[in-house]
Amino acid sequence: MANTEDVRPGLSLTSRGLLRDGRPWLPVSGELHYTRVPRERWTERLRLMRAGGISVVSTYVFWLHHEPVRGQTRFDGRYDVAAFVDAVRAEGLEIILRIGPWAHGEMRNGGFPDWVQQLPVQHRTDDPAYLELVAEWFGRLAAALDGRCTPDTVLGIQLDNELYDQPGHLVTLKRLAREAGLSAPLWTATAWGGADLPDPEVLPLWGGYGDGFWVDPGEPWDPTFRAHYFFSDTWDDPGIGADVRGEEAGHRAELSPWFPAATCELGGGMATAYHRRPRLDALDIAAVAHAKLGSGSAWQGYYMYAGGTNPGPGLEETQATGYPNDMTRLSYDFHAPIGESGRTAPSHAALRLQHAFVEAFGERLAPMASYLPEVRPSGVEDAETLRWALRAENGSGFVFIGRHQPHVPLPAYRGARLSVDTSHGTIELPSAPVDIPPGTLARWPLGLEVSGVTIDWATASAVTVLPESAGTPPTLVLIEDAGIPVEVAHGGFAHAATPGAAPVRIAGADGAALDVLVLPAAEAPRVWVVDAATGGRRLLVSSDELTWDAAGRVRVRTSGDAPDVREYVGGSWHAPDREHLDGAPVTATVAVRLLREATSPSGEYGARDGRQAAPDDTVLDAHAAVYRLQIPEGLDADAVLRVRWAGDIAQLRVDGATATDRFWDGSELVANLRDIGAGPDAHVELHILPLRRDTGVHLPADAAARLAASTDGLCELADARIDQRALWCEIR
């Protein structure tokens, strides 16, 4: 990293990837903003991240949150960045601090305090007056971290964000950070938009979103989004931030010769702007990550992985503060794998399988180059050509197949049989052509050696490897790709395998043996793999939510009378011993009383650059339907409110103050009752502003169809429900 001072013993970086203690390492990072999450929730969020396969936590340090008034800094409560670093490290996770000073993150002024934004300086340049401000801020941040921002504790520091044409300024920021006492073994910067970065001072990090709010409301699915559903050797995404930076950007879009292809912003979901409200499902999100992994990613990084709530009103990006977009005032749910309420989305499970694969095979995968086939899709409109890639080294690797994209469904690919030239000869698989159904995201092993036994190839996706246990050999765990016959080839012969059946034992040379377990495709959302760093890798299957601490002790949140958890041990499935710790499951309908009927708003709220502005509270106060919600007694900290609704904007107000909000995109509003202060004695109101049929905002297809089928627009409350789970813990 262009210096020898910020060294962590055992950690090194090459043009192919990262090494820890001489062994390749493929990190999986996920973004969580500590100031957007109540402090008392940090540990449970971090454990959910770990259970999802996250090994590195990244976070913005928003200057705006910490120093709204010059010289008056806040580092207590949810603003206690030092305590957050401690919490991350206590869970055995690494941390990346994205210190800015400009961050974005859908924050007003990109995270600059107003007093910084308003000063007559040349922001984000080497203007001495601006650098003086930055040096003061970095000094206060370093004092708050109190010696924690060192190479031993912090894995990396990101400088600024989406800075395209100031490579010298990034070097200056690095110097100022180091002079303040902030250092890490990795220094990073975002590379998309053709950013001109100062090699080798910073590790370039790339991004990729399957859809986004930064496109005008009348525009179709943009090619910059579509491209991420293909395997490719192109890493730049010129779309991210394009509406903010304008036409001018950097001019370098290729990989640096110094560094590997690494990411920090693969879309874990998407924020909702007023004018455009994309809603990606689990497969949409997983397909982008899968494509990057097959394309040679040395670092899988997600933005956001855990959503949250702005710590106060008026902090969000708005047209009134110079942006082209109006964002929700408080909610930053992002449709992330872990939502604003702390509940997991289906994307948590879809990504969890990929991350289990990375945890088990990342050491092999990380140094493997990516190879694209001779026949490739002709462009983003090509829905016919098979999309696949190979990551391999010395005849061993993984075949990646992707057959999914949103908005424009892909047909089944008929008669697929792949031919791969390796150092050991040409391999053809499967043994006969198969159809690849839409929705397939496959990771087929090729020349995979496990415990002295080599699997020539298999037509089921690799998940993990379990250690030897109870007299059984190590177990290679595969999962069926729905609709594709499972074959496992060994010793030159392919054999059919039945998903869900007992494992098949394969003998190798000199007494070596390997069990191969194939899980049915239907089990994919229920698979949890406890990572090996906890003392031993474990395979569990459950519809309940599982987390575990750094010692590997599993906790279960269940809506049933008892947990439904099975663990694969010693060649068979068993129910782990467990005990009830706290709480009881509650599913109840909330009593709702209509206080005021809605009236039709004008729909004329202003606009900027062709993008509709969001109405302010005066419009809601005049036209929204208002419902009183009576929260029942006896609920605990796990209880959430689930609201099925339709309209333009919803606000949950507690004792007169808005606690969270949504722009409607067809999804539920989910809020943790404890976090928003909504107890049985609180006055809780739901305000729903009607959505006019002629709104012009961009909605997901199902929501748009529902609006079009309405007579006078939408303003509906279907129901409001309480969802609370019990907490159980395994006995070990």
Image: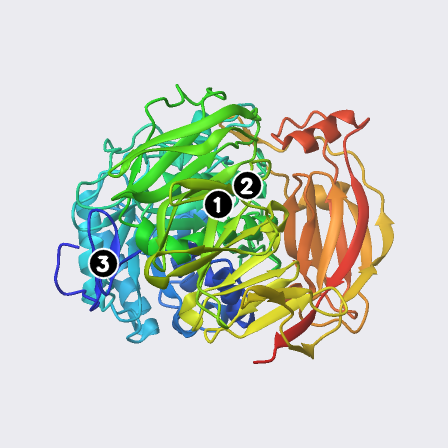
Image quadrant where one finds the C terminus: bottom right
Query: Which circle marks residue 634 in the picture?
Result: none
Name the quarter where the N terminus is drawn.
bottom left
- Which callout, 1 or 2, points at the residue further toward the start of the chain? 1
Determine which of the numbered discs, if any, sits on residue 132 in the image: 3
Front position in the image: 349 or 45: 349
- Label 3 SS: helix
Drawn side of residue 417 relative to residue 336, left or right: left
**Residue under the point 14% across and 65% down:** 5
Residue at the front extreme of this rendering: 510
* Residue type beneath disc 3: Glu
- Label 2 Cα crowd, 10 Å radius (few <14 / some 14-19 / many 20+): many
* Secondary-structure class at tag 1: strand
Residue on which disc 2 sits:
481
Q: Amino acid at mark 2?
A: Asp
Q: Nearer the viewer, residue 159 or 486?
A: 486
Q: Amino acid at mark 1?
A: Ser
Label whose residue precedes the other's in the sequence (3 or 1)? 3
